[in-house]
Amino acid sequence: MNSRRIKLMIVILLLLCSTISQARIKLVALPERAATVIRLDNPTATLIEEERVLTLQKGLNKVDFSWKGVSIDADSIRLRPLDHPDKVTLLSVSYPPNEAALVWDISSDSDYAETVRISYLLSNIDRLITYKAIADKAETAVDLKSFLVLRNFSGEDFDKARVLLDYGEAFEQGIDHEETKRMLFLKAPSVPITKVWKFDAAMLPWDPEKLENRNVGIPVSYRIVNEAKSSLGEFALWGGKTRLFQDDGHGSTIFLGEDVTDLVPVGEKTELYIGDSRDIVVTQRKMADNRVNLRKNNKGDVILYDTDEIITAKIENFKDGPAVLTVIEHIPGQWDMEECTLDNKALKLGVDYKKKNANILEFEIELPARTDKGPAVKELKMHYHCRNVRP
Amino acid sequence: MRKVDDREQMTEERSSKMKRIILVLCIIVVMAGISWAKVDLVTLPSRDTVQLTIYNSADITLVRESRALTLKDGENKLQFSWANTLIDPTSLEMLPKASADKIDVADLTYPPRVRNLGLWNIKSGVSGKVPVEITYLTSGLTWRAFYMGTLTEDEKTMRLQGYVRVTNNSGEDYENAQTRLIVGKVHILDEIAELARRQYPYGRPGEIMPAAGVPVRGLGRAKREMEKLAYALEEAPGAPKEVKKEGLSEYFLYTIEGTETIATGWSKRLLSFDVDEVPVVNLYKYEEERYGPGVVRFLSFKNDKEHNLGDTPIPGGMLKVYRGIGDTGHLSYTGQSSFKYIPVNEDVELNLGPVANVVVEPKLMDYKTENYRFDHRGNISGWDEMYTFKIEVRNTRELGVKVEIQRNFNTQYWKLEKSGNFDGYEKVDLDTAKFTLNLEPRSNKEFEYVLTTYHGVRQEDWGRASQ
């Protein structure tokens, strides 16, 4: 272990021979690390701040700082005297050849036991965030727990350090090299969720009948909003792996699935994909695709035309409960809708369905539960024209 | 660290195999600065109960164990090791089931340079026995569904028996475990088996995770598969246990009555349901582009009350279909089909493969072209093609059958005129039509249709012509 440690030594340069300047004789005090802070507020780098007491003598002092086997960014190392900032001055920093070390030349106007703060960026020490959410049986809310995982592979042991995240209180934690520690740091009971079923016509197969013996799963997600109403909303939720469970009503839980969430700023939502529903079946078919309104050149070749297209989507709910299915449809190019119906009732753009962008439509279709007679069935029909298509 | 390991070995009275999850409770005498040095071993609590929730869409099992720990007031350390098992260490969680407000599970540490070991730091405000629940995910336990169908001699009804087979290759013996099975497709990011093999549970910073270190179980697994087969042959289902089924979220939970002991390497077959007299339809399908020139037999029924089913979805699996012969209980093997998950109230169509005793023969009887159009240069710019097809359907079986014939036209500009003896015709999509016929035993039917397809500028006239 000793070969892989940060060492700090005050070096008395014995000027026995004025011509031999590289004789680096390491001597005297080896000050212990006092208050150490591990700052994990930047996800890309970890900043360590440690305080040590240097016994300085009046005049020039050489302080040797070495970090063999420890991944310190040498350019990031900073030294700050805390007790006598005006009287203790850092004159220069020199780096010896082929050594993970540096030497500070410190000038002091008197003899001091000076507390200094050394800070540096340390690689291979970081934190991960993971989540565990347990949904109630009715799937209206989750008990959300978040865990902080500290991983230290930096080469350095930290017996005791104050660990700081970008929010919340600092806490004391020691962590050795090659050690991983997981601790609970957030508990949010009863966070409301919205269950979302989504059929995206560009992502999923249209006709399940054509897939010999394979079910088309409709992706199911839980939507969580990072806001006060959700007993959250105090800070951005860091991205991380989330495992979702559900209360089974018998004092136990089942595992629902897992997903990874990106950073969720305050006020924003996240959708966690848990698994697929095979009890909602969408069969989408193109029932017409004809060229109309042909425009021809002098030779009689078609140079421009419109289309007359009909797409139907039969949506069946075999579940014993209702569901709201989000259907995403894609219509490329320039187009206009002649008629859009759900069970032969006209749907209005902006009221009954939304245009997400020029080519994507979003429908929210309420599906009642199945009955004894069979599944609840809805039929969405889009009759539209693509305009000014060139062959 | 070594001290703990030594003691751990001494206390492994229950098993010399090392293939066990070991839980060691240590009470720590806190000394300033030295948190490890004085570790006194207190108890080795065994599992009181264990519950397995096994998934079939992924190699994942949720294990929930309850154990009684003897805690001291103050700081306690609890060591949990899982060498030679397939546990995902990141999934470990412990919850006190009593005095929860006085017991704080402060952190879980994966100590350096030790594999397959976790250390819980517990701050307890109580002293004495405390029941705790430990949950984790493991791989190596699997289950699958399979079915046996026995048709009556007249093939009007079928006895349908559903089985589940649970296999334990987890490296851990689970004794008297409550066994639950999940039907459903869960979303998984990482293979549990891969997480179990990692050198460091959460990996290292900046690492892209293939991390192995432990050899992948290649040959070993093959051997175990063999053993599994041997056991399965020896094994016969005993008195059937009830399997309780209930829906949760998008999944179904099957709870097997009582408890099961499934030692590692073994598998167990259990009867999931047994339903007699499920009415079935003998459905035959013909679609050249999909099934080739032959007729394919399907067995069709519905997962609903009318078919004595419909309580729960039927998980996907392989069905072997037999047919009863005579009164002496002899069987004839009809065929097998794998099928997908079938929701409640959905139709089931089981593909039993091609047959020769129902024949569909489409014959092109006439072909002509007409309605030519010419452009200003005198070249052909449009025409119609007319195909007259005669479709002959022969049922050589002594049973009535239903036949579905699907025809694809490769163009959306088509018109169909039909004539002859058939029951229905339906436009499936823009270039597909389906004809449905019901045939009496040993009977033939034939019908004709004239398909007109429009080409070139004649497509412009198609709308009017097809009205």
Image (cartoon, coloured by chain):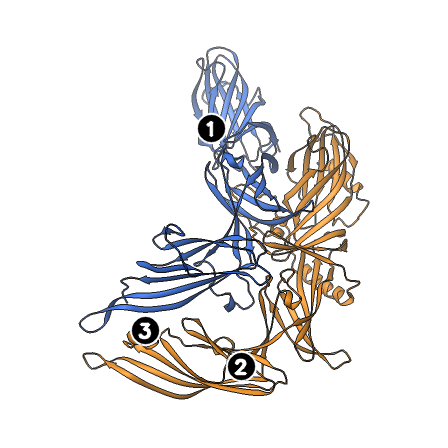
Chain colours: A blue, B orange
Mark nearer the viewer, 2 or 1? 2
Q: Going by the image, does B275 lie left or right of A176?
A: right
Disc 3, disc 1: CB below 8 Å? no
Does residue A358 lie above or below B148 as drawn?
above
> How busy is the neighbourhood of tag 3: few (under 14 within 10 Å), some, or many (20 plus)?
some
- Same chain? Circles 2 and 3: yes
> How busy is the neighbourhood of tag 2: few (under 14 within 10 Å), some, or many (20 plus)?
some
Q: Which chain is indicated by disc 1?
A: A
Q: Position of residue B282 (x, y in %)?
A: 60, 77
Q: Position of residue A8 (x, y in %)?
A: 54, 25
Q: Which numbered tag is attached to residue B463?
A: 3
Q: Which chain is indicated by disc 2?
A: B
Q: Secondary structure at mark 2?
A: loop
Please tell me which residue lies in front, A382 or A125.
Answer: A382
Does residue B374 lie above or below B201 as drawn?
below
Q: State whether residue A314 appears in this view.
A: yes
Q: Position of residue B310 (x, y in %)?
A: 64, 63
Dividing the picture into quarters, in which one does residue A251 lie?
Answer: top right
Q: Secondary structure at mark 1?
A: loop
User: Mark 3 is on which residue type?
Assistant: Gly
Image quadrant in which the C terminus of chain B is located: bottom left
User: Mark 1 is on which residue type?
Assistant: Ile
Please tell me which residue lies in front, A281 or A215.
Answer: A281
Disc 2, disc 1: CB below 8 Å? no
Q: Which residue is mark 1?
A: A77
User: Mark 2 is on which residue type?
Assistant: Gly
Q: Which residue is mark 2?
A: B294
Dividing the picture into quarters, in which one does residue B5 lie?
Answer: top right
Q: State whether residue A25 appears in this view.
A: no
